[in-house]
Image: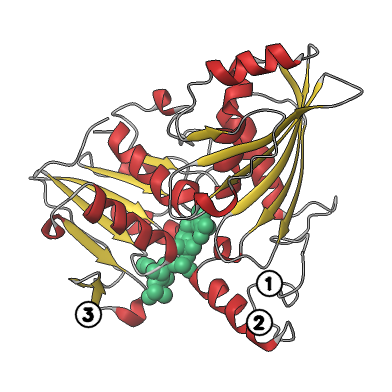
């Protein structure tokens, strides 16, 4: 994995948002990138304003077509909603979005997008670092990072996916308000204060005291956008078509998604074989609790890059079913860390 050098410039688009700030935290505090090599961008209403990130002052650029200095390699990290990401790819490529958009991105620019805009475009790689970054080549100038729920799910089941033959996957999610962005987080805070009576544009119902099984709109078959994203993105990343049964819900938690997973396996498991699988796991970022134990890492994942895998157990009457519980920070490992690890993989 590489690290930025003096010949790299990193543009964080959506720097004032949850994912953008987490990216800045990694770049400036962990990688110690010089703030002079970082450019920050936000919505037009902030153009020209100063943005203070932990004492570093950045002048926010206006969204507009950009000419990138050829003496440097530029990484443009899009931490914006899908339609804004599309707009930015057009600004960078100086053309309209079509299926050949990647041919128009300058050779000294690499874009990594955290939104859903390009995830399912066949020629654009959809990457989870630690799972399929080997697919990346220097010819990739636009790379998509998956939905946070997909990243946590696939990193969490990785030890099992690598070592066992999985026939089918069942997942139910319990997702934090911050998965919908900074303003959704603020909406939860005001909703909790008012006791769950405030309606807002970020959740379909007041979220305080509720578990809402609706994230994104419903399709004609009764599945939500979030559920379809998890299904389709998982199939693309794992290069599989196994049935994945997903139900997504939003809960009144600020940060940290939880997922209950059940894997149907081709062969029955024993306590001994499961223990061996867990011991042999080399999955990056995954912290595995002792199988069959009640050890619960819970909020220890917040502000970290860990995906915790706990409550690991075999079904008492059918040992071809394996159950587990996954938890992770949706903003860090669910978005910002993955974007930054893709940058490293491309250096
Ligand atoms: N939150 C998560 O857990 C998570 C996880 C995985 C993926 N994602 C994806 O990551 C993206 C960002 O999510 P987020 O949670 O960080 O959202 P957010 O907190 O709402 O932040 C959105 C950012 O976009 C900026 N923006 C708005 N219009 C813009 C424009 N025209 N040009 C440049 N910047 C513009 C906003 O600037 P202002 O401050 O000026 O409005 C803000 O900085 C989304 O696509 C989301 O689906 C989020």
Q: Quadrant of residue 174?
A: bottom right
Q: Nearer the viewer, mark 3 or mark 2?
A: 2
Q: Quadrant of residue 294?
A: top right
Which residue is tagged 1? 203
Instruction: Give x and y (percent) for residue 142.
Output: 37, 41
* Labels 3 and 1: the sequence-earlier one: 3
Q: CA distance from mark 3 to mark 2?
A: 33 Å
* Labels 2 and 1: the sequence-earlier one: 2
Instruction: Give x and y (percent) for residue 27.
Output: 25, 52
Residue drawn at x 24%, y 54% as measured from the top left:
29
Q: CA distance from mark 2 to mark 1?
A: 11 Å
- Residue 80 seen from this side: no
Residue drawn at x 31%, y 29% as measured from the top left:
139
Cβ atoms at labels 3 and 2 below 8 Å apart: no
Cβ atoms at labels 2 and 1 below 8 Å apart: yes
Q: Nearer the viewer, mark 2 or mark 1?
A: 2
Which residue is tagged 2? 191
Q: Quadrant of the C terminus?
A: top left
Q: Dot 1 lies on which element?
A: loop
Q: Is residue 302 above or below residue 106?
A: below
Q: Is residue 79 above or below residue 205?
A: above
Q: CA distance from mark 3 to mark 1?
A: 32 Å
């Amino acid at each position: 994995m590489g690290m930025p050098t003096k010949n790299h410039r990193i543009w964080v688009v959506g720097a004032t948002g949850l994912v953008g700030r987490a990216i800045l935290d990694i770049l400036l505090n962990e990688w110690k990138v010089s703030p002079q090599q970082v450019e920050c961008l936000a919505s037009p209403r902030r153009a020209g304003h100063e943005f203070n990130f932990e004492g570093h002052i950045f002048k926010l650029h206006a969204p507009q077509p950009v000419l990138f200095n050829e003496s440097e390699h530029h990484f443009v990290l899009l931490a914006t909603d899908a339609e804004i990401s599309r707009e930015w790819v057009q600004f960078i490529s100086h053309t309209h979005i079509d299926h050949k958009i990647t041919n128009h991105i300058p050779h000294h620019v690499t874009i990594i997008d955290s939104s859903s805009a390009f995830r399912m475009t066949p020629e654009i790689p959809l990457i989870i670092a630690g799972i399929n970054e080997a697919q990346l080549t220097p010819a990739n100038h636009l790379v998509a990072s998956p939905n946070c729920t997909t990243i946590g799910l696939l990193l969490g089941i990785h030890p099992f996916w690598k070592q066992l033959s999985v026939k089918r996957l069942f997942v139910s999610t319990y997702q934090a308000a911050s998965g919908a962005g900074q303003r959704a987080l603020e909406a939860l805070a005001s909703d909790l204060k008012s006791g769950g009576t405030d309606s807002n544009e970020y959740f379909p119902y007041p979220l305080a005291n509720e578990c809402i099984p609706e994230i994104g709109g419903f399709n004609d078959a009764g599945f939500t956008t979030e559920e379809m994203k998890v299904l389709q993105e998982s199939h693309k990343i794992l290069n599989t078509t196994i049935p994945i049964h997903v139900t997504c819900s939003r809960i009144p938690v600020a940060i940290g998604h939880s997922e209950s997973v059940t894997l149907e396996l081709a062969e029955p498991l024993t306590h001994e074989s499961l223990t061996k699988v867990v011991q042999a796991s080399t999955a990056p970022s995954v912290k595995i609790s002792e199988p069959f134990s009640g050890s619960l890492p819970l909020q220890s994942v917040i502000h970290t890059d860990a995906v915790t895998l706990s409550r690991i157990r075999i079904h008492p009457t059918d040992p071809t079913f394996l159950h587990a519980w996954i938890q992770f920070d949706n903003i860090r490992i669910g978005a910002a860390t993955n974007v930054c690890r893709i940058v490293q993989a491309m250096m």
